[in-house]
Amino acid sequence: MEDRGFDLENRLATLEENELKRTLSPVDRVAERGYFAQPCGSELPVLDSEEALVFASNNYLGLTDDQRVQNAARRAAATVGTGSGASRLVTGDTMVHRDVERLLAETKGAERALTFSSGYAANVGTITALEPDVIFSDELNHASLVDGCRLADCETVTYDHCDPDSLRAEMAARAQRAEASTDSRSGSKATPDGETESWLIVTDSVFSMDGTVAPLSEICDLAEEFGAWVMVDEAHATGLYVDGGGVVQAEGLEDRIHVQMGTLSKALASQGGYVAGSDDLIACLVNEARSFGFSTGLAPPAAAAASEALHLARHSDARERLWENVTHLRDGLETMGWDVPGESQILPIVVGDRRDALALEAALRDRNVVAPAIRPPTVPDGECRLRIAPMATHDQADVVACLEAIRAASEEVGLL
Ligand SMILES: Cc1ncc(COP(=O)(O)O)c(C=O)c1O
């Protein structure tokens, strides 16, 4: 009989050969330092005897370890329950969901917010529910936005990374094409049914692997010129900018951006995603986002932890401490000779070759600093890197130790 199964062994061997195979290294806790185990497959992990500094987490404000956030999760588990038990549309809609959504809406300057069980689900569910005819997508957008575009089954036009001129050229070309193909009908930008096409511009605000920040104001100008909507993914910005908001708040663009998306899983130290926008947008998502309706509601302890973390992001000095560490690290890396692109808390060290990236990761790990190599498909081949991300809870000595380890490791590997 013919084998109609899947040759996984061969696939894994190819990944291994190309230095692209991933493994899992468990850690004892989620914080700025921890005891890691070597990758062990299905065997029981054995934790290293030495503690390592973590400089690659998205737990930017270090709030996973904060007693107040942990207590909020404990209280929600005890009073509401450990899980939602059903979709929010059935019986899974609780007071803690409403609490975090109210606070998110206030922070994001929106009429209403809606939480999803992950940021991935928020992106895929929102883009598909909107059913755009054409999406204009930054070429480096996160995989969950890319997958949302694929699932939406519409025309997706990519534009050059953070380049408003490229976006303008793509929109102008698309408008011209639509006009030419519908010249018997009135107006430009028409669908085969003669209706005006719906256009959605989609971009990360802070790009997670590059540390770059999207030119949101110029993107809004273009959206207004061409009549499109804008959706911004603030996964790596939420909680870090003015009053606990994202780049949209830092630039005062709330009224010009139609869909503000983000996650609860990074600076907000929890799990889940959210969308903030108009009452109508949220009502539409409640009804039509399949990843919302056909998925169990966010777990109540996650909602409560995110709510407390957002409160702390707004009202504590955690943001200030994070940005001090970012400045210290960026200055140190640049003084050392590394060119650090971007203008956010994410500090990429781009080494190019995947073997060099893996060697640098290993040399850092030998010095008890954890910053995994980032390889394809996360970044393009030839642009492999370490992605250094400090946290608010690192102290000055931690940052100095990280810089010393990077210098010694880079020299050992021959990169400096
Ligand atoms: C830019 C961006 N958007 C969305 C997501 C997905 O968020 P979540 O991890 O909550 O599913 C991530 C996280 O990996 C991300 O980096």
Image: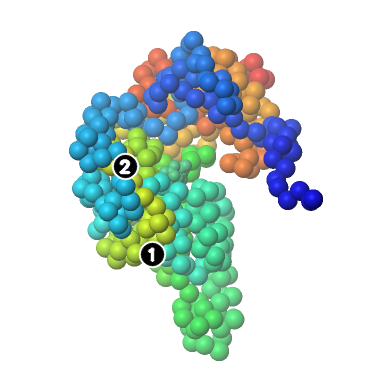
Residue at the (47%, 67%) spot, across then down: 132
Q: Nearer the viewer, residue 331 or 408?
A: 408
Q: Which quadrant of the figure shows ligand 1?
A: top left
Q: Is residue 350 visible?
A: no
Q: Are marks 2 and 1 in contact (CB under 8 Å)?
A: no
From mark 2 to mark 1, how far is it between C-alphas? 23 Å
For residue 287, side relative to residue 336 (left or right) = left
Nearest the camera: 371 or 43? Answer: 43
Give the side of residue 78 with respect to residue 196, left or right: left
Picture quadrant of residue 382 = top right
Q: Secondary structure at mark 2?
A: loop
**What amino acid does circle 1 point to?**
Glu
Mark 2 or mark 1: whose residue is earlier in sequence: 2
Disc number at residue 288?
A: 1
- Determine crowd level at label 2: few under 14, some 14-19, many 20+ residues with C-alpha closer than 10 A: some
The residue at the point 53 percent across, 60 percent down is 151
Residue lying at the far bottom of the rendered structure: 184
Asked whether residue 153 is in view, the answer is yes
| Residue 294 sits above or below residue 75 on the image | below
Task: Tally the marks.
Answer: 2
- Which numbered mark, 2 or 1, is in the foreground of this view? 2
The image quadrant where one finds the C terminus is: top right
x then y, percent, for residue 340 = 53, 32
Residue 220 coordinates in the image, percent (x, y): 40, 60
Q: Position of residue 60 (x, y in %)?
A: 38, 32
Dot label at residue 208: none
Q: Residue at x 59, y 81 (%)?
A: 180
Residue under label 2, please give it: 83
Nearer-the-camera pick, 11 or 179: 11
In this view, 77 is above or below 287? above
What's the residue type where badge 2 is placed? Answer: Gly
Residue 393: image x %, image y %? 34, 24
